[in-house]
Amino acid sequence: MLTGAAIGFGVIALLLFLGWARRNRDRLPFGGGERAATGLVLGLGIAVPIVVLATLFVWADVFVLRSTAAPSPRSTQMAIDVVGHQWFWEVRYPGTKAVTANEIHIPVRTRVNLVGTTADVIHSFWVPELNRKIDLVPGHPNRILLEADRPGAYRGQCAEFCGLQHAHMAMWVYADPPARFRAWLADMAKPARAPATPQARRGRQVFLSNPCASCHTIRGTNAQGKVGPDLTHLGTRTTLAALVLPNNRAALEEWLRDPQHVKPGNRMPRVPLSDADYRALAAYLEGLR
Ligand SMILES: [Cu+2]
């Protein structure tokens, strides 16, 4: 700001001086006033801007754009596919069976080629601490480099208005030590655990005999729906409905009883069931680790 102010005042002072010099030519102490003025105009008006703009252009192109541009797949160590949905994120690990939602796990200090598309309208994938945004456009995959230097959780957000619950289309990126990441990925690739208690067994039955199964996939069961998030390992996630609720038994039950109350307008309808059925469903889903 100070530099800007200095340049601004400098220009105004020069203009005033030139105007004054024009009218008072004979009073100038040096003879070549006209030549000095031309020199100033050529120097400050043409030469300096060329040098400054060329430097800025090279700097922006070489350092800023290069470091945020789509990575060449050969320069990266792994790929992740992200598909935007109204209003959640589907996350896939190509070459494995792992599918999850609203949380992306990456190994720390690893160059990840993230490929983004959409299942419906245009969304925008943005994790401000890790890189700039990319639009998720139908039929045109866009790519971006994800690389975290430090382990931790980085919050991401849809950055293109995509309808009623756009503001509640968030996600976490977890950067883990590589060994921990590999263990997580191996777990995610497995089919769902069998229910461990009678209540959870009842929950699975309720799930498979209601519309749940036509919208959600639970790998290893007959539920193969593609409308909502894959629930195979729901119990390992930290949040529900793209960061709207924490993931615990009480919140899960609250969601199942009335998803439209929790996240109005979202694409999961309320499925009317008995109290005991809701509790059984929550017990089953919480056990999907
Ligand atoms: Cu959005």
Image (tube, rainbow, N blue to C red):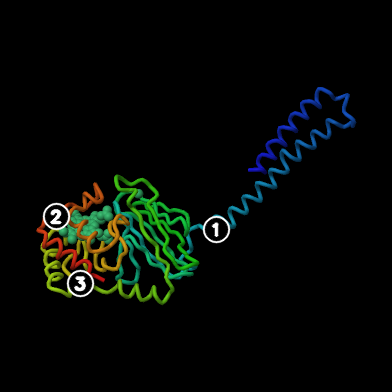
Question: Do tag 1 and tag 3 residues touch (Cβ < 8 Å)?
Answer: no
Q: Tell me the mark number nearer the camera, choosing from 1 and 3.
A: 3
Circle 3 Cα neighbour tier, 10 Å, few/some/many (<14 / 14–19 / ≥20): few
Q: Say which amino acid is labelled 1.
A: Arg
Query: Where, by quadrant of the figure, is residue 84 drawn?
Result: bottom left
Q: Nearer the viewer, residue 49 or 171?
A: 171
Label 3 sits on a secondary structure element that is: loop
Return the disc, 1 or 3, that comes first in the chain's sequence.
1
Q: Tell me the mark number nearer the camera, choosing from 2 and 1.
A: 2
Q: Say which amino acid is labelled 3.
A: Gly
For the residues labelled 1 and 3, the Cα–Cα distance comes to 43 Å
Q: Which residue, given by chain and number where applicable, does mark 2 sit on?
A: 271
For the residues labelled 3 and 2, the Cα–Cα distance comes to 23 Å
| The N terminus - image quarter | top right
Return the disc, 3 or 2, that comes first in the chain's sequence.
3
Circle 2 Cα neighbour tier, 10 Å, few/some/many (<14 / 14–19 / ≥20): some
46 w.r.t. 233: above or below: above
Circle 1 Cα neighbour tier, 10 Å, few/some/many (<14 / 14–19 / ≥20): few
Q: Which residue, given by chain and number where applicable, does mark 3 sit on?
A: 220
Percent coordinates x, y for residue 199 in the rendering: 13, 70
Q: Which of 212 and 3 is in front in this view?
A: 3
In percent of the image, x 72 and y 44: which residue is there? 48
Q: Would residue 193 appear left or right of 27 to someone viewing this image?
A: left
Q: Which residue, given by chain and number where applicable, does mark 1 sit on?
A: 66
